[in-house]
Amino acid sequence: MIRTTLPLLALATVAACATPREQCIRDANRGLAPLDRLIATTQGNINRGFGLAEVQDVRVLRTTCEGTNEDGSTFRFPCEETETFTRQEPVSINIAEERTKLAQLQQRRAEQGQAAQQRIQQCVAIHPE
């Protein structure tokens, strides 16, 4: 929980300090990052020749827990803790379909990149520094 909270807190702090122009430009570019990640993933799949699927595994750990009696004294007892972790597992892909998907993603990225540039120009016009 702390690992995800700290970056979000830092991002919120930076966003709060951004000028209206910077906020507008950030908003204009917001749709490009997910496309860039999808393009990188698809290109990686093509380069490797296989995809990667996330698989969650559950492991039960036997450990010793501590309790408190009514009189305030502590006692130990055997207990189990459940741990969940994620790993990546190779999966087969159709390379031809991945190449088609990559071309479509790159086309969408180009279109959205042009639209983002137009929105950025509007941001600069609306919020001169």
Image (spheres, rainbow, N blue to C red):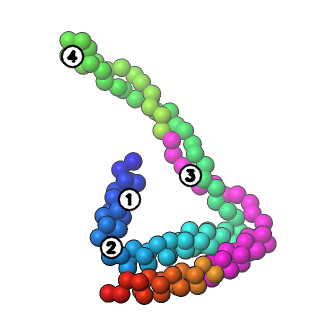
Which residue sits at x=20%, y=16%?
A: 72
Q: Which residue carries the number 2 mark?
A: 18
Q: Which residue carries the number 3 mark?
A: 87
Q: Which residue carries the number 1 mark?
A: 8
* Mark 4 nearby-residue class (10 Å; few <14, some 14–19, many ≥20): few
Q: CA distance from mark 2 to mark 3?
A: 37 Å
Q: Please provide percent x and percent y for residue 31.
A: 55, 71
Instruction: Check disc 4 and give the amino acid type.
Output: Ser
Stretch of the chain drawn in magenta: 84-110
Q: Please provide percent x and percent y for residue 60.
A: 50, 33
Q: Which numbered disc, 1 or 4, marks the residue that appears first in the sequence? A: 1
Determine whether 73 is above or below 85 in the image: above
Q: Which numbered disc, 2 or 1, marks the residue that appears first in the sequence? A: 1
Observer-side mark, 2 or 3, equals 2
* Mark 1 nearby-residue class (10 Å; few <14, some 14–19, many ≥20): few
Q: Magenta span has 51?
A: no
Q: CA distance from mark 2 to mark 4?
A: 54 Å
Instruction: Check disc 1 and give the amino acid type.
Output: Leu
Q: CA distance from mark 1 to mark 3?
A: 24 Å
In the displayed structure, does residue 83 sit left or right of residue 102?
Answer: left
* Mark 3 nearby-residue class (10 Å; few <14, some 14–19, many ≥20): few
What's the mark number on residue 73? 4
Helix, strand or loop at label 3? It is strand
Label pair 2/4, CB-CB below 8 angstroms:
no
Observer-side mark, 2 or 4, equals 2
Which residue sits at x=46%, y=72%?
A: 27
